[in-house]
Image (tube, rainbow, N blue to C red):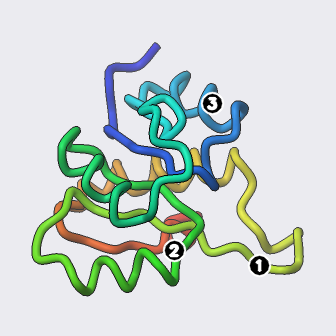
Amino acid sequence: MPGCRLRLLLDEDTQARRLVLLLRAEGHEILTLGETGKAGAPDSEVMRIAAATDRVVLTRNCDDYLALHRGLSDHPGILCVFQDADPVKAMSWHDIAHALKNLESAEVPLQGQFMALNAWLF
């Protein structure tokens, strides 16, 4: 298994078992919201957990997290997966893993950033 890559906190909408296993197999250090015992917590609490554990949030709840990002002066980062109503255009679990690999390869600082992960799928 590759060395630890990104430290991610997966929001409830992205903690599907297959995605968690795939990202862990890729070497990412994954913590799901369910594993924190905070299932159902509001997004602001998710951001507090991310800050306390120094993890970038991975979510599909883009609008709400963009609003949180705009109101926070500092956070570990937010990676958002925009989903399309057309399943052909939506990102699969493998697409998410591939986009994370591309983002990581670019060595882009994530601290304080809100990024659409979709832009890294190439």
Residue where numbered disc 3 is placed: 22
Q: Nearer the viewer, mark 2 or mark 1?
A: 1
Which of pointers 2 and 1 lies earlier in the amino acid sequence? 1
Q: Position of residue 68 (x, y in %)?
A: 33, 78
Please state the horizontal and vertical placement of residue 91, each as a whole percent of the image: 71, 62
Answer yes or no: do the residues labelled 3 and 1 have beta carbons within 8 Å? no
**Against 58, is 117 above or below?**
below
The residue tagged with tag 1: helix, strand or loop? loop
SS assignment at label 2: helix
Along the polypeptide, which appears first: circle 2 or circle 3?
3
Q: Do the numbered discs 2 and 1 sit on residues whose CB atoms are within 8 Å?
A: no
Residue 77 in percent (x, y) is at: 27, 62
Nearer the observer, 57 or 52: 52
In-front residue for pair 104/58 = 58
64 on left or right of 74? right
At label 1, the amino acid type is Asp
Name the residue tied to disc 2: 119
Q: Is residue 31 above or below residue 67?
A: above
Q: Position of residue 13 (x, y in %)?
A: 63, 55
Q: Within the image, what quadrant is residue 83 found in?
A: bottom right
Residue at the (33%, 20%) spot, across then down: 3
Amino acid residing under circle 3:
Leu
Q: Are marks 2 and 3 in contact (CB under 8 Å)?
A: no
When asked about the image quadrant of residue 71, the answer is bottom left
Q: Could one spot residue 108 in this view of the protein?
A: yes
In the rendered image, the vertical position of residue 95 relative to residue 28, given as above or below: below
Q: Earlier in the sequence, mark 3 or mark 1?
A: 3
Q: Which disc, if any, is residue 84?
A: 1
**Local secondary structure at mark 3:** helix
Amino acid type assigned to the residue bearing label 2 in the image: Ala
Farthest-out residue, left = 73
